[in-house]
Image (cartoon, rainbow, N blue to C red):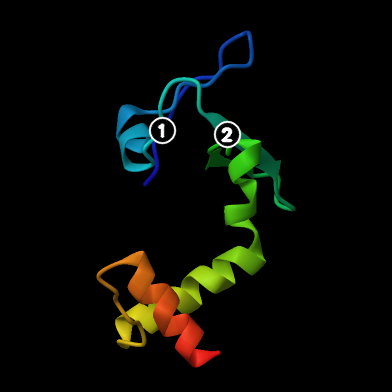
């Protein structure tokens, strides 16, 4: 997708609505700006994460999430009717 937009005297560029919609960008969102070797400007939408939730986006945590998703997909899970049932199951395994 390509379109023209104009740079204002203040250095601002308006992103076309179609692009904002397709990238789920909202007013106030952040955009990473990079310049590649050929002199092209690359804009990448970014979302901020609260510091107390940043652990979730670490590679180590995401690896665990992918493993859990795989276990669920392949039926390698056990469901319990209560917490007490789960504790009994774990105690029996110990």
How many marks on residues?
2
Q: Identify the secondary structure beneath mark 1.
A: loop
Which quadrant does the C terminus fall into?
bottom right
Q: Secondary structure at mark 2?
A: strand
Residue 16 vs residue 65, the one in the foreground: 65
Q: Which residue is mark 1?
A: 25
Q: Is residue 37 left or right of residue 81?
A: right
For the point 36% across and 66% down, which residue is it?
A: 83
Residue ranking furthest to the left? 81
Q: Look at the numbered discs 1 and 2 and tell me whether their residues touch, using CB distance below 8 Å.
A: yes
Image position of 8 (left or right of 59) = left
Q: Residue furthest right?
A: 37
Give the residue displayed 46% in from the left and 21% down from the top.
14
Nearest the viewer among 22 and 47 is: 47
Relative to 6, does residue 16 appear above or below in the rendering? below
User: Residue 76: x percent and y percent?
Assistant: 36, 87
Q: How far across and down, in percent of the image, does residue 42 sit? A: 60, 43
Q: Which residue is mark 2?
A: 31
Q: Quadrant of residue 35?
A: top right
Find residue 63 and report its horizontal and vertical position in percent: 57, 72
User: In the rendering, at what x and y percent does residue 27 appear?
Assistant: 44, 20
């Amino acid at each position: 997708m390509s379109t023209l937009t104009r740079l204002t005297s203040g250095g601002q560029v308006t992103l076309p609505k179609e692009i904002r919609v397709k990238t789920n960008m909202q007013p106030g969102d952040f955009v990473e700006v990079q310049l590649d070797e050929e002199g092209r400007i690359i804009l990448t939408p970014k979302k901020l994460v609260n510091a107390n939730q940043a652990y979730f986006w670490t590679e180590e945590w995401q690896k665990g999430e992918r493993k859990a998703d795989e276990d669920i997909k392949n039926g390698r899970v056990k469901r319990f009717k209560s917490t007490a049932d789960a504790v009994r199951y774990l105690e029996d395994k110990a």
